[in-house]
Image (cartoon, rainbow, N blue to C red):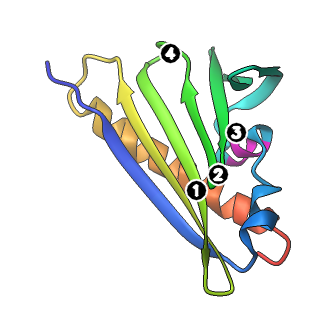
Amino acid sequence: MWTGMREVERSRFVMARPPAVHRTLSPEAVVAAEGTFTVTAVEETETGTLVTAAGPGMSVPLRFESHDDGLRYTAEGEVGPFDHLETRITVVPEENGSRVTMRSTVSLNLPLPFADRIAAWKRGNEIERAIEELAADVPGG
């Protein structure tokens, strides 16, 4: 059975400059804003920040890397039902504020028809919730 990766993206304008937005984008804040997992551990490593996130019946290691324009994080290895989970958050200047974009690529390790579409739909809801909450946390956002 063919399973493919799906990409979902959400974007929002925030009435704050990129430096103010970046200050709210901690790995813990991002995981909490998505609303699916609870952060149980945070470890700073040479390659970035490793966040252990716990959800219903699973623990997910997420590796965060800081970039000039935002954050990128990936699930380490096969995690629960996921073959692949990667999310990029970018913050770029726009008019008198910033454009915050979350783009996530997801693939499920389940032999079900439409599994990747369902995963993309769920992931889309998670990043929609995250971008709204993160934007609300930005001073002036």
Q: CA distance from mark 2 to mark 4?
A: 26 Å
Q: Can the viewer see residue 56?
A: no
Which quadrant is the N terminus positioned in? Answer: top left
Q: Position of residue 135 (x, y in %)?
A: 71, 66
Label of residue 70 in the image: 2
Q: Are marks 1 and 3 in contact (CB under 8 Å)?
A: no
Q: CA distance from mark 1 to mark 3?
A: 16 Å
* Mark 4 element type: loop
Q: Position of residue 50 (x, y in %)?
A: 72, 22
Q: Earlier in the sequence, mark 1 or mark 2?
A: 2
Give the foreground label among 4 and 3: 3
Which quadrant is the C terminus positioned in? Answer: bottom right
User: In the image, which residues are magenta?
Assistant: 29-33
Circle 3 is placed at which residue position?
31
- Which amino acid lies under the numbered mark 1 shown in the image of this protein? Thr
Position above or below: 106 against 58? below
Q: Does residue 118 belong to the magenta stretch?
A: no
* Mark 3 element type: helix
| Residue at figure coordinates x 55%, y 17% from the top left | 76
Q: Are marks 4 and 1 in contact (CB under 8 Å)?
A: no
Q: Earlier in the sequence, mark 2 or mark 3?
A: 3
Q: Position of residue 18 (x, y in %)?
A: 72, 67
Horizontal relation, residue 65 to residue 84: left or right:
right
Horizontal relation, residue 121 to residue 76: left or right:
left
Q: Are marks 2 and 3 in contact (CB under 8 Å)?
A: no
Farthest residue toward the right? Answer: 139
Circle 1 is placed at which residue position?
90
Secondary structure mostly seen in the magenta stretch: helix
Give the foreground label among 4 and 1: 1
Q: Does residue 32 belong to the magenta stretch?
A: yes
Q: CA distance from mark 4 to mark 3?
A: 17 Å
